Amino acid sequence: MDSKDEKKEKNKKQVLLRLSPSLWKELMVWAEDDFRSLNGQIEYLLTECVKHRKKLKKDDIDKL
């Protein structure tokens, strides 16, 4: 890992997240299917949702 990646990792914020047992189980299965940890899967999904939201906002602006 180079110093840029190390700095990026150190800047990550921690969040306490409570999940129902059924949601936790579904996310674990999904994470295993994608060869990710549960934490990595949640981070990936949130990142994709934020990208999607930004795209939707950009599309709304482009319609003006």
Image (tube, rainbow, N blue to C red):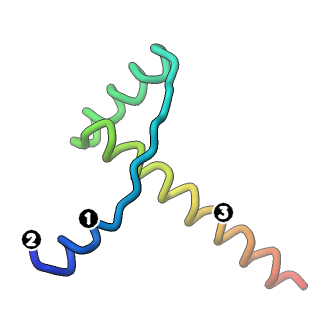
Mark 2 vs mark 1: give the one in front: 1
Picture layout, residue 39 above or below residue 44: above
Horizontal relation, residue 2 to residue 25: left or right: left
Q: Which mark is residue 21?
A: none
Q: Which residue has dot 1 on it? A: 9
Comparing 14 with 24, the one in front is 14
The residue that label 3 is drawn on is 53
Cβ–Cβ below 8 Å for labels 2 and 1?
Answer: yes
The local crowd at label 2, few if under 14, some if 14 to 19, many if 20 or more residues have their Cα within 10 Å, is few
Kind of residue sitting beneath label 2? Met
Q: Quadrant of residue 12?
A: bottom left
* Cβ atoms under marks 2 and 3 closer than 8 Å: no
* Residue occupying image coordinates x 14% and y 79%: 3
Q: Secondary structure at mark 1?
A: helix
- CA gap, disc 3 and disc 1: 24 Å
Q: CA distance from mark 2 to mark 1?
A: 10 Å
For marks 2 and 1, the one nearer the N-term is 2
SS of the residue under disc 3: helix
Percent of width and height locating residue 6? 18, 71
Residue 1's mark? Answer: 2
